Amino acid sequence: MKPVTSHLMRAYARQPVSFVRGSGAQLWDEQGVEYLDAIAGVAVTSLGHAQPEIAAVIAEQAGMLLHTSNVFRIDWQERLGERLCALTGMQRVFFCNSGAEANEAALKLARLYGHRKQVAEPKILVMENGFHGRTIATLSASGNPTKQQGFEPLLPGFLRVPYDDIEAVRRVAAQENDIVAVLIEPVQGEGGIRVANTDYLRELRALCDQHGWLLMLDEIQAGMGRTGTWFGHQHAGITPDVMTLAKALGNGFPIGACLARGAAADLFSPGQHGSTFGGNPLACRVACTVLDIMARDQLPERAAVLGARLLAGLQGALGDHPSVIVIRGQGLMAGIELDRPCKELVGRALDEQRLLITVTRDSTIRLLPSLVCTEAQIDDIVARVTRLLAAFAVDDLETKTGAAQQEVML
């Protein structure tokens, strides 16, 4: 294995493996060792690695036109905007390059909305354990102190309440007059795969209507078919005022989108927001192709079926595991919460099971397989995770036994 370069900033705790080739849900490293990918680039490569139609479109468009800037009309951008609005019930779209940028646009819309209502210091209601990005604004909106530490002072203007607790929202609404929007994930991905109750989302929509707030949904991880519907909030039968997308929208090619309807749709005027690279012809053509493939192959519906299989398999195999507190999920978003920190399992899964997983909130194994996995691959993910946790339990028992023996000797 090649030595790790010392010229990169140490922003990531990287695993000591480099992948050189992929196909579907499989990856191969520099030595030709095959791995099973259960995280899809953290909910990004939902159509799998090296998807041939995506690769062909990238090559063709790269040979025609990459970038002109948003000074000019971009046909593929307009096509993508029309299609996303048709899928979502929204009216306008702003294109950018990432989820954090999409949420940044949403936060700016909320503040513009508040000032239009003559609210001098508009406030946005956000959730505990939420995660919306790593810019200063989106970090301020997030509910993870460990990610915020060292970047103070954070931006003011955010009020935080417990997730999936409508009474907490009502209490804040009775005390605060300057709230203009609510920002929420229908499924908290970084927060440990916590799924909002459908009744909660419906009541939140009603409260926003009652108070004149914007309901802003962060669908960056839960959107694009992953939960078994095109977008996570559709399980509740509601429509947001603002919605953000990224990750799987480009299947690995960087693109983000902030969609809006109603009063929020016409808030931006020329010069108030922008992006040099956002919505370039290549990114938007790739995203249009992603939509084509997802619709043709009915991938949201497939995610619902495979997700039910994944959760049933995990619950059947691990429901009585002594270290497992709870198994949560919706569609192909699954979280296995353990009774102790388990970040070491990311490296152990690679070494012992040739499986890619992540651990979030220190003690929750997060699984985000691609939407094109086979049933056999879903079953294989369950089997490898089960073997991983069996070894984890044995090691923990040996550690406890050794500690007890040492205490007796003392």
Image: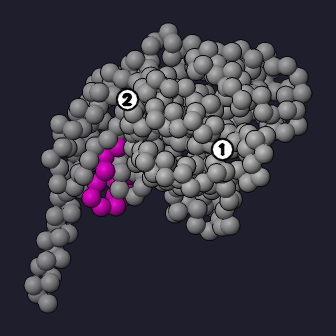
Residue 266 at x, y percent in the picture: 77, 28
Q: Quadrant of residue 216?
A: top right
Name the residue: 40% across, 58% down.
362
> Percent from the top left, x then y, of residue 23?
46, 26
The numbered dot on residue 66 is none
Horizontal side, residue 288 vs residue 344: left or right? right
Front residue of 64 and 11: 11
Q: Quadrant of residue 303?
A: top left
Depth order, front residue of 377/296: 296
Q: Which mark is residue 180?
A: 1
Whether residue 124 sits left or right of residue 35 in the image: it is right
Q: Secondary structure at mark 2?
A: loop
Q: From this view, report whether residue 56 is shown above or below residue 14.
A: above
Measured in 3D between alpha carbons, the distance from the residue under mark 2 to the one under mark 1, in whole angstroms, is: 31 Å
- In this view, the residue farthest toward the top is 296
Q: Magenta span has 113?
A: no
Which circle marks residue 331 in the picture?
Answer: 2
Q: Give the residue drawn at x 58%, y 33%.
A: 209
Position of residue 42 measured from the top left corner of the image (x, y, whole percent): 49, 40
